[in-house]
Image (cartoon, rainbow, N blue to C red):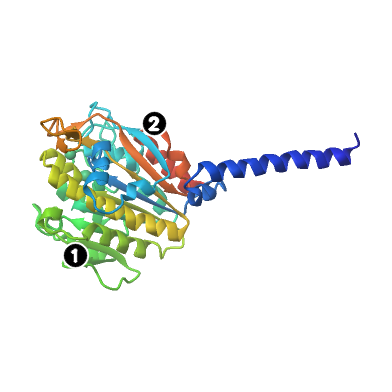
């Protein structure tokens, strides 16, 4: 055979393979919109990490049964599972759990941004901000609480709220919203750190969201300590603060990293209070909608949703009579559990989040997606 017909034949075979691949993708894949982007192997410019503190699979399942709106969890095409143990304990706390996401290391329960030898460890916020990437944190707890603190502070104990607030003033964070004002202006050392925030270029809001955002850094502290419960009238703080953060951060050419925490899903579990837990979970679900709508419209954003651990040993069991048509949520503990937690991903790079892996892998995946740009 001369080389000309051979080439034609090869081209014919290759196009047959390509056509059949496309057919299969379209047939099998109900999330074509996302998958088509990822097969181009493009990396995200922006990452939104949403942490439902204490949110195991039963908590996520509650969004099916207790929300009158369609669940935003069902919009994610890629699902994985994260193993949550810390270096000190089979059952982690939120400090070690968040340090795993922020710094990619296993450390002891209670540690904020430090190794098991209490040495400071670099965070993703510190590592990416040198490349001009903007960073933001939104939380329904105090902004100095374990989960957000692990992204900017380095202290040996999560209880050191005053010290943690000091780290935030001097950190690379460009936008934050949550509670915890008293750790800035009612401190043991009687310093007023709200002055330090302004000195370091923040616009500080303590009453309401700022209406018009300048290009200045934003500090939003709307409560002395934790934000109120949903049941006590928190309203749409979490979705609205997330929306505001996205508007501010996305003005940046170099991209952004935003961490959003539904902090009080965990507290509903500790209280063994299903109504508390579910109201916080639905608020978090609504917030996922804000992040996903942004990512869909933006096209250069990866959205990751996970938990640091499960809380409450929460189960959607049947009622006392064993009626399988009647769910009665129950708790097996007022603490955390060792069960794996789900990871949901949407957008560019989402394909790297399927499978079962350690919580520390979430940091390594995020950092390599930022670095490969
Ligand atoms: Mg937390
Ligand atoms: Zn907890």
Residue 142 in view:
no
Q: Residues within 10 Å of mark 2 (few under 14, many from 20)?
A: some
- Quickly name the residue at label 1: 195
In the image, which disc is placed on residue 356?
A: 2
Cα distance in 3D space between marks 2 and 1: 45 Å
Secondary structure under badge 2? strand
Image position of 307 with respect to 261: above or below? above
**Residue 165 at what x, y percent from top left?**
19, 52
37 vs 189, nearest the viewer: 37
Contact between marks 2 and 1 (CB within 8 A): the answer is no
Secondary structure found at label 1? helix
Residue 367: where, in percent of width, then height?
A: 43, 44
Question: Residue at 45% of width from left, 60% of height from top?
Answer: 298
Left or right: where does residue 132 sit relative to residue 165? Answer: right
Q: Is residue 295 left or right of residue 161?
A: right
Q: Position of residue 135 (x, y in %)?
A: 35, 55
Left or right of 315 on screen, residue 130: right
């Amino acid at each position: 055979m001369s080389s000309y017909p051979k080439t034609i034949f090869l081209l014919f075979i290759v196009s047959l393979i390509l056509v059949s691949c496309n057919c299969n993708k379209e047939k099998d894949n109900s999330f074509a919109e996302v998958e088509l982007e990822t097969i181009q192997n493009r990396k995200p410019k922006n990452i939104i990490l949403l942490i439902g503190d204490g949110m195991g699979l039963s908590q996520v399942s509650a969004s099916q049964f207790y929300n009158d709106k369609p669940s935003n969890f069902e919009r994610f095409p890629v699902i994985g599972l994260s193993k949550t143990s810390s270096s000190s304990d089979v059952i982690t706390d939120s400090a070690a759990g968040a340090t795993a996401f922020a710094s990619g290391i296993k450390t002891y329960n209670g540690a904020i941004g430090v190794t098991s030898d209490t040495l400071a460890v670099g965070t993703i916020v510190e590592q990416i901000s040198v490349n001009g990437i903007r960073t933001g944190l939104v939380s329904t707890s105090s902004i100095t609480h374990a989960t957000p603190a692990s992204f900017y502070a380095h202290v040996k104990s999560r209880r050191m709220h005053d010290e943690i607030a000091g780290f935030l003033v001097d950190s690379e964070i460009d936008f934050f919203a949550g509670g915890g004002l008293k750790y800035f202006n009612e401190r043991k050392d009687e310093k007023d750190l709200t002055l330090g925030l302004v000195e370091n270029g923040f616009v500080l809001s303590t009453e309401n969201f700022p209406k018009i955002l300048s290009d200045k850094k934003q500090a939003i502290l709307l409560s002395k300590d934790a934000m109120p419960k949903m049941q006590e009238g928190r309203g749409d703080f979490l979705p609205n603060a997330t929306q505001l953060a996205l508007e501010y951060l996305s003005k940046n050419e170099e991209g952004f990293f935003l961490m959003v925490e539904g902090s009080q899903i965990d507290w509903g579990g500790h209280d063994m209070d299903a109504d508390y837990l579910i109201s916080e979970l639905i608020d978090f679900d609504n917030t996922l909608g804000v992040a996903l709508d942004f990512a869909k419209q933006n096209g250069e954003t990866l959205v990751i949703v996970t938990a640091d651990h499960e809380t409450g040993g929460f189960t959607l069991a049947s009622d006392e009579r064993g009626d399988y048509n009647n769910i009665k949520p129950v708790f097996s503990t007022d603490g955390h559990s060792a069960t794996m937690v789900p990871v949901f991903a949407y957008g560019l790079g989402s394909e790297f989040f399927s499978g079962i892996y350690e919580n520390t892998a979430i940091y390594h995946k995020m950092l390599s997606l930022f670095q490969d740009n």
